Amino acid sequence: MCNQSVGLIQRQIEYAGITTVSISLLREITEKTRPPRALFVPFPLGYPLGEPDNADLQTRIMRAAFALLSRNDCPVLESFTP
Amino acid sequence: MANMADIEFKEKLFLKGYPFKHYSPRPGDPISNAVTPLLKPLSACTVALVTTAGLSLPDQTPFDLTIRNGDSSFREIPSDISPQLLEMNQRSWSFDQTGILRDRNLAFPLDRLREMQQRGEIAALAPHNYSFMGSIVGPATLMKESAPEVARRLKADSVDVVLLTPV
């Protein structure tokens, strides 16, 4: 449900004129909700930025997500490779 | 990796019958199909975080876990706090909360964003970020009221980019 909520909120923010990107933990749900830009990450539910206290991994995931901001061929759904 | 196989049988049955299509983008709907191109480099952008981790500050009313279709309200989180202050109230199915309780940056990476600003990768952190509780089964109020209100507030803060994180 979290992944659906994120998609619904994301679309409203994009509609308001702000460029958005989200993290996806469940590819199946994100494929259905189709937010403008999403980065699928191969981590368990509750771990959207990978690991606690791992600033390096968290930063790499954020950079990979931000790299999708230039994409306008929406919906964009890419996968993060750790 | 999280996939549908990890989710408990009860939840899987629920998700199988859930009318995702009802809330999926529809052709011709301007909200579903909106695309806002980024017109400047990230290093010139003001960035905000939006999470559905159910995080709130100790002096804010916690999310109401008893509302049948889910609490669709939001909490405004200023950027000048330590994320470790945040409390988590989450009525969620089957997810491990221990990681976020150890390090809130796992879902709400305010410290990481601050580091990116210090390195010049982004221009600024938005003054306000937003937190929702994720397990909203009946998202009508979310779609009609709370999400558009958060979008308006972000726009009023001249935010350029929003990073959204589920749990």
Image (cartoon, coloured by chain):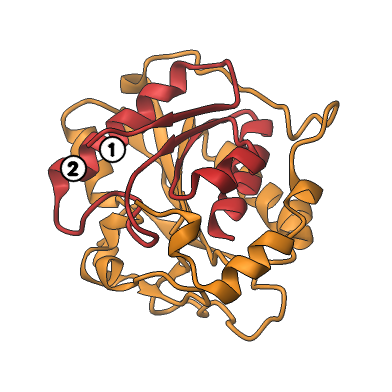
Chain colours: A red, B orange
Above or below A32: residue B34: above
Pick the quarter of the image with the C terminus of chain A: top left
Q: Are marks 1 and 2 in contact (CB under 8 Å)?
A: yes
Q: Which residue is mark 2?
A: A57
Which residue is at a point 47% across and 60% down the rendered structure image? Answer: B5
Describe residue B25's horizontal placement relative to residue A29 as left or right.
right
Badge number at residue A61: 1
Pick the quarter of the image with the N terminus of chain A: bottom right
Q: Is residue B72 visible?
A: no
How far separated are the C-alphas under marks 1 and 2? 6 Å
Q: Give the number of marks.
A: 2
Determine the secondary structure under disc 1: helix
Describe residue B145's horizontal placement relative to residue B80 as left or right.
right
Question: What residue type is disc 2 on?
Answer: Leu
The image shows residue A45 at horizontal and vertical percentages of 39, 60
Describe residue B143's horizontal placement relative to residue B3 as left or right.
right
* Near-viewer residue (B115 or A32): A32
Q: Quadrant of residue B122?
A: top left
Determine the secondary structure under disc 2: helix
